[in-house]
Image (cartoon, helix red, strand yellow):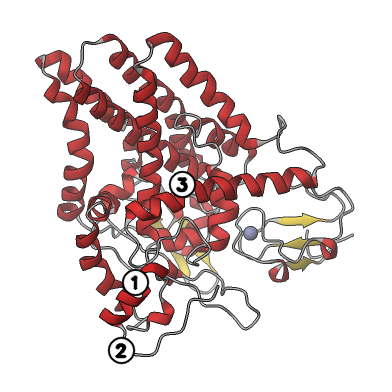
Amino acid sequence: MGKYRCPGCGYTFDEEQGDSHEGYAPGTTFESLPETFTCPDCAVRYKEDFEQVDAEAAR
Amino acid sequence: MTTTYVLDHPEKGRIEYRDRKRYLWMSSLFMPLFPMLGIFLYFAFDTQWALAIPLLFSYFVIPLLDYVIGADENNPPEEIVPQLEEDRYYRLLTWFTIPMHFIVLIAIAWFVGTQPLTVWSVLVLAITAGSYSGLGINTAHELGHKKPEFERLLAKIVLAVPTYGHFCIEHNRGHHKDVATPEDPASSRMGESIYKFVLREIPGAFRRGWAVEKERLARQNKSVWSVHNDILQSFAISAVLQGGLIIAFGWIMLPFLALHNFWAWFQLTSANYIEHYGLLREKEASGRYERCQPHHSWNANYIFSNLVLFHLERHSDHHANPTRRYQSLRNFDGLPQLPNGYYGMYLLAYIPWLWYRVMDRRLLELPHIQGDLSKVNIDPDQRDAIVRKYGQQQTTAVPA
Ligand SMILES: [Zn+2]
């Protein structure tokens, strides 16, 4: 399970937790998000802009 | 008593920044005095003419002050922004304005419901109250973009005052995604008057906000008609507030509240109208629009109206960094610039022929357009007339 981060505003999609407000259950893979997915916080960045957060690099 | 932000930058050395507007931002706390001013003067001088003073202030004195006081040199360096964002002083000011919107509407409604007023006075008071509630939409805009749950809750609450509960959802997820494209009901087109725009903007915004919320709830396996619907939650507060006013002050509240609500919405329409007039994002080969660039928003960098509007007029930076707080928004050279602050431009927009005269040339002269009508978001009904008037070169159709 990985984390994916919006390079614009820092919103992070954590596959383990999902995003309950957005309606993505825990365990939802980033891969399975719709292609039209835009950052829920800034709406500026598209799905393919998201960067995978390296588990070790992220503190 | 000043706060200086300091950063020792590894390459650029010591960076210092002092926000010269820091205490001027407190003016937001005094804004409710303006809609109330007419009422104080009415009691002091016993004349209904006094009731018009707040509106005269908004539409004539603010543009004049923008002209006289001029541009804002205060611009935080990017490196200092994280420190500014952390400073809780700024966000407290926005929070304090929330209850004031309820108090002012109730106070003006009480005045309308209990004083012997002419029809004209009631109209003026409804518009005055609507203008201040329009500022409430502006504060909801600032708060609704922020990540803390509490600030989004405040946004939802204050939107109940003008009955515009769908705004934050529609704006954050709809407008910011589609801005400066023909698909966006909240981006105006060249040749489209504000009176035509409003008929596309208000219903279009509601439909899109509702659709976005419906999709979100569907992913949670919930009906759009549920208590979890953020739009309905805000409307429920509106029903209590405005229903309570009708019960307390009688039938006069119906036209008063209808005009108040409409005028607050129309303030937002006015801002939307001038913020992206004619600007167009290009379509990429993939069929999707390029990401929103700084030249896709009109800016105004005037000190006074920016203080009233929490830096809304530094609009390009807002679209580049929508979650950034108002105190950190910056102005840049070379951006599309409006010739006056937003209040002055609203007035201009209300006179369409004058608006076109001032803005159409300014639009076509932008460095990224240079008269190329294929790079302009044009009203389809006006396309032929605009091509006849301005189009020397071949123009391509707007991508559908
Ligand atoms: Zn983002």
Name the residue: 68% across, 36% down: B229
Q: Residue at x 33, y 13 (%)?
A: B110
Q: Is residue B201 left or right of residue B30?
A: right
Q: CA distance from mark 2 to mark 1?
A: 29 Å
Query: Which quadrant of the structure image shows residue B257?
Result: top left
Say what amino acid the circle numbered 1 marks: Asp
Q: How far, Cα to Cα, is label 2 from label 3?
A: 35 Å
Residue that numbered label 2 is attached to: B392
Is tag 1's residue or tag 3's residue first in the polypeptide sequence? Answer: 3
Say if residue B294 shows up in the picture. yes
Q: CA–CA distance between discs 1 and 3? A: 32 Å
Residue B341 position in % (x across, y down): 27, 54
Query: Where residue B186 sits in the image (x, y, percent)?
Result: 46, 55
| Residue closer to the observer: B233 or A31 | B233
Answer yes or no: do the residues labelled 1 and 3 have beta carbons within 8 Å?
A: no
Q: Quarter of the image containing the C terminus of chain B?
A: bottom right
**Judging from the image, what secondary structure is the residue with disc 1 in?**
loop
Sequence-wise first label, 2 or 3: 3
For discs 2 and 1, the disc positioned in front in the rendered view? 2
Q: Residue at left 39%, top 55%? A: B197
**Does B59 appear above or below B279?**
above
Q: Quadrant of the N terminus of chain B?
A: top left
The residue carrying mark 3 is B202
For label 2, the crowd category at 10 Å Cα-Cα, with few meaning under 14, some 14 to 19 and many 20 or more, is few
